[in-house]
Image: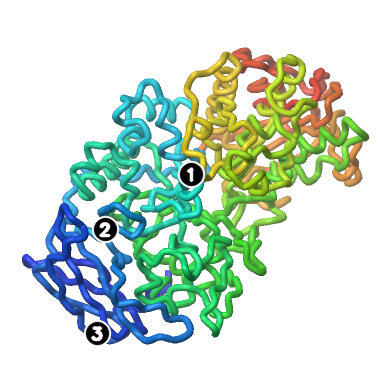
Amino acid sequence: MPDFSAPGGAVLDDLGVRLHDGVATLRVWSKNASSVELVTFDETDLDWVTDQVELERRPGGVWEVTTPLLQPGTRYALRVGGPHGPGNTFNPETLLLDPYARGLAEGDGYAEWRSVVIEDGFDWGGVTKPAVPLDRTVIYEAHLKGITKRHPDVPPALHGTYAGLAHPAMIEYLREIGVTTIELLPIHAFVSEPRLLERGLSNYWGYNTLNFFTPHAAYASDESRKQGPEAVLTEFKGMVKLLHEAGLEVVLDVVYNHTSEEGLGGPRSSFRGIDNASYYRQDSSGAYIDTTGVGNTLNTATDAAARLVLDSLRYWANDMQIDGFRFDLAAALGRDAGHEFTRDHPLLTAIRDDPALQGVKLIAEPWDVGLGGWQTGNFPDGWLEWNDRYRDRVRNFWLSDIDYARRASAPVGIGGFATRLAGSSNTYSKERGPLASINFVTAHDGFTLHDLVTYDVKHNEANGEDNRDGADTNRSFNHGVEGPTSDQGVNAARRKAMRNLLGTLLLSAGIPMLTAGDETGRTQGGNNNAYAQDSALTWVDWEHEPWQEDLRSHVSTLTRLRRENAALRPKRYARRDVHTPHASVMDWYNQYGEMMEESQWTDPGNRTLQYSAVSTPVDERLNRILLIVHGTESPVDVTLPTSIDGATRFVSLWSSADERPSGEQEEFAPGDVLPVPGTSMRLFRVE
């Protein structure tokens, strides 16, 4: 690895508060300020100023003071003065948060926040990160409050909290369904937008960051919150420690692309008052260039903003022992001084190359809403990406294509689906391989799995925007009835569709991401943009009907089969006639057991295939699987291939046609003819 240099170099080292020798040094960056003042407050009355002291300007735009006023637990804020003119919004009367504050105290109003000095003394007890290999990673995307709020075995005092997620009942559940890595929606301190508060709603998802170094206090237990920011921090770290002890990784969804200060005229809580012209993207008139859709975009083309992101990641990865990060609207972080995305952007490569971040999982949401913002497949080596092409193709194949076929005939063949199943080699370079792809069918944003098979259109009236918000194109299929129904045929078709979607997700090459609650068919009543719904609508329901327990059993079975069969999780793309370690050599057969012909890949009349994968082991046993995929509603007879070298039998492992996973491992011989129900999958081990 080449010598690493962080943005801004040594000039930007040690920003924020550093305790030493009974005093503390506070360092704040502002290139354009003319004055920076430290203000301290009474611990119980955040309006009572106890002292003030000026910071001195240092080289490189850093302001500094060493003072005994800052001690563990001290509440403090900044006042920053500066010139007027395009891009500058200084007001020396405004109390501002230190961008590097490790703790926050909340007052009575939107602007009543104070930074808090934290002294870290947590004992990790020798517990280290699980370091789950990428090929064995199964991600579970969850909202911290939503997943624990209603769990009957979690004590009520811990519902919706960090401690609740680390409760033995939650850990047992996560391990039972076979996930390895829990990806939490934003837990950086965040606030609700004023427009939501005016409508009696709140920002439930948390994509409105107030501070990049502080855990969200509302997710701590009442006891910890009463004890203060240090206790909140301790509860968060205790959660991570217990999850790590259980072998579970913790990935954070991080929102560095924008802040809660919104557009000009929005709240002034930190960056806007410290150095608006440097921290936010603007044109020459001072108007914001917004590529995030929420009013502002952090200008990571400047060293100070880029370094802020890097320093925050270092803090969470090391001091907090976080295993990885999913970067919301990551294309915004890779925009240069001309506001165009570049895959070799200094921040993107710095995050990857930083010695302090080695081994950390880096997951990009590879788009934003600006010009040229869709960048799936175009992030640097070392980055993983949410694969929206995978999502769309899989939904099309099992849902919208079937819907269309009921009125006419299937619109496309199976070729595009097969490419996604095999690792999306048409999207990712051979150097990055299939594990660059985070495969998903659903996420927090959009329909749940249940709603994807139950609703043709969104039902977002509860959001108070007259159903205008949320995506209009969902590639969903209600199977003939909009919403809940007592029609058993419709309900059976919906359940099988969910099993097909889950089976595809967990048997595809790449890294699967499951959305919390999908394993039991959680519904949001057709709301595909429930960002402002902090209620039973979005909280995971733990009271299940028998079919929901059956669905969960399918997920547990599929994650186990993924662990046991290396051919399902290749690390590299195979190359014909070239031995490629850690790859899976794939062959494709039609319903008659013959090799697929070129014309069959695109023929809409051919939506049945058999997919054979053979592992190329280095540290595991040789493994071979066969997967049958049938993508029309009419049943079909499938002849098992006779030309797989050395194959003498096919052992049945899983079928999406079963309401509950069958424990029987039926055996079949090459050339046997199997009746395959409509729209179904079946997995075999080849021996």
Residue on which disc 1 sits: 201
Identify the element where label 3 is drawn. Answer: strand
Identify the residue shown where x is 64% and y is 30%. 450
Give how far apart the Cα atoms at labels 3 and 1 are. 43 Å
Identify the residue shown where x is 77% and y is 16%. 489
Q: Position of 642 compared to 117: left or right?
A: right
* Residue 164 vs residue 321, the one in the foreground: 164
Mark sitting earlier along the chain (2/3): 3
Q: Which residue lies furthest to the left in this view?
A: 22
Residue type at mark 1: give it: Leu
Q: How many marks?
A: 3
Residue 368 percent across, percent down from the top left: 60, 61
Mark 2 packing: few (<14 Cα in 10 Å), some, or many (20+)?
many
Residue 494 percent across, percent down from the top left: 71, 25
Which mark is in front, 3 or 1? 1
Residue on which disc 2 sits: 102
Q: Residue 57 carries which label?
A: 3
The quadrant holding residue 375 is: bottom right
In the picture, the quarter occupied by the N terminus is bottom left
Mark sitting earlier along the chain (2/1): 2
Residue type at mark 3: give it: Arg
Mark 3 packing: few (<14 Cα in 10 Å), some, or many (20+)?
many
Mark sitting earlier along the chain (3/1): 3
Give how far apart the Cα atoms at labels 2 and 1 are. 28 Å
Residue 511 percent across, percent down from the top left: 56, 44
Q: Work out whether 177 lies above or below 26.
A: above
Q: Position of 72 compared to 229: left or right?
A: left
Residue 214 percent across, percent down from the top left: 31, 54
Q: Which residue lies furthest to the front in this view?
A: 198
* Residue 424 vs residue 479, the one in the foreground: 479
